[in-house]
Amino acid sequence: MGFIVAIDGPSGAGKGTITSKIAEKFNLTYIDTGATYRCVTLELLQKNIQLNDIEGIKKVLNEIKIEFENIPLKVAKKIEKNNKSISKVKLNQKDVNNNENPSLSRNINTNNNTFSRNRVYLNGKDVTERIRQKDVNENVSKVSHILEVRMAMVNLQRIMAEGKDAILEGRDIATNVFPNANVKIYLDASVEERVRRRIAQNKEKHIEMSEEEVKKNIETRDYNDKTSKIGPLVRADDAIYIDSSDLTINQVVNKISKIVKTEYDIFNTEKNAYIMTKETPIKKIRRSFLKHLWEFLYRIVYRVKINKEYKYNDNEAYVICANHLSTMDALGILVTNKRKIQFVAKMELFHNKILFNWAHVFDIIPVRRNSADINSVKLCLKALKNNAIVGIFPEGMRHGLEKNATIKNGAALLAYKANVKVIPVGIKSSFKPFTKVEYNYGKPIDVREFKTEDPNWLDNASKHIMDEIIRLSGNKN
C-alpha cells in the first residue's frame, strides 16, 4: 500500500478544499470519495429507483460506471475551456463487486502531474456540477447509508488508491476504508460556520437554497452520519483533531502540511529501509573498518568472554536467538563474530540518519513491531537462503528474561521455513563499564524435530529455544 492521508469530518468542514490543496502540495492522488456516493445517488434519482428497492439498487451498482478525470490545477481552466481529456479512471462497479481483474484503466496518476481538481463522469457524461445540486444534496446522505452502496463504494475507493500515494476525504476513511492510513485527520467546524461556507459555495455554483434549508440539510446530514450503523462519522482514536471554524484555508493547509510532511518523510525512510544496498568493495571496506573499530572499543570498555558448546559450520545458515539486556549486547555479538550477522531491528532505528546508514552497511533487516511484517520475513528468508546468519531477539526477552513472558514464534517459524537451525545464545552482564560480558553459545536446535500432529508444536519449539537461552544465561524463571 502507498502513502495514505485520510481526512474525515462533517459536511461543510472544508474537507474537499483542503484535500485538493494538500494533494497539489505533496503530489498525492486526490480521491473524492463523496463524489462516488453522489454519482450513485444521481443515477438512482434519474432511474427513479426507490431507496428501499434493494434489488434495483444492486442492478445499478452492477452497471454503473464512475470516471474521474484528474486535472492539474495549473491547466484545469484550459482543459475545461477546450473540453479536453487527460486521463480517465474508469471504474466499472460490476467488476469491483465481482472482485475480478477489470480490464479498465486505473492510471490515476499516469503522467505524474499534481492532480487537484476532479471532473466526474457518470456513464460517460460529465456530472461534476450536477452531483452538487439540490436534489442530490438532499438524498446523498440516505443513499450512503444503504449497506450495499456503502460496501460497493468502499471497495471501489480501495481499488482507486491501490499502490498509490493518495489522499481521501469522507466520514469513515480513517475508521473503515483505510484504518491503517499513515495520516488521520478529523477536520471539524461549527454548524454556523459550515452553513456560512455552504451558502457561499452554493452562490458560486448558482445553487438556490435558503439559509434555513442549508442549516437543516447540514444538521440532518450530521445526525444521519453520526448515528449510522454503517460507517458512522466518528473520530478515529489516533486521528488529529483540527477545528477550522476560526482558521483560514491557508492556516488549515499549513497545519495539515506539517503533519503530512513529517509522516511522509518517515514513510519514505521506512520504504527505503527494506532496500538492501548492493554489496560493493567500498561497502565491504566500510563494514570491515567499522567492525574492527567497534570491536577495539568494545573490548576496552568490557571484558568479553565467549563460550561455545558446539563448533559451527562456517558455510551454514543459522538463526541466532539471544536474550536482550541492552543495545550493547547486539553490538557485541556483531563485532565478536567472524561471519557477518544480519540482525533484525525495530523500524524506529532507521529513523535516525546515522543509524540508517550503518544499518545498510551491515544489511540490518527492519521489522515493524506488533504487526505481520511480510517484507521483513521475505528479507530474512532471502538472507538465510544465501547462507547468512540472521540475528533475532525474541519478543518477551527485549528487557531480559521477563517473568511469565510469552515468547513469539517468529524465530522458530523462520528457521522452519528456511530449513535452518537455531543457535541459542545466553548473555550475562550488567553492561556497566569495565565489567565482564559473557556470551554463551549453545548447541544448534533443529525446530523440525518438534513438528508433530500437535497444532502447538511450534509453541513447543519456541519454548525449548527460550529454555536453552535461560540455561545459557544462568537465569531462572
Image: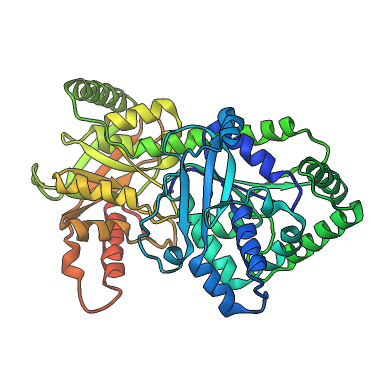
Q: Quadrant of the C terminus?
A: bottom left
The residue depicted at 88 percent of the width and 48 percent of the height is: 192
The residue closer to the viewer here, 228 or 409, is 228
The image quarter containing residue 339 is top left
Q: From the viewer's side, name the closer residue of 153 and 199.
A: 199
Q: Is residue 371 left or right of residue 142?
A: left
Q: How is the model colour-coded?
A: rainbow
Look at 69% across and 60% down and name the residue there: 233
Q: Is residue 147 above or below residue 220?
A: below
Left-right relation of 307 to 138: left
State the image coordinates of residue 140 (x, y, percent, origin top left): 69, 62
- Horizontal and vertical percent position of residue 287: 24, 25
x%, y% of residue 295? 26, 26
Q: Is residue 425 visible?
A: no
> In front: 474, or 250?
250
Q: Could you tell me if residue 162 is visible in this image?
A: yes
Q: Is residue 161 left or right of residue 372?
A: right
| Residue displayed at 54% across by 37% down | 71
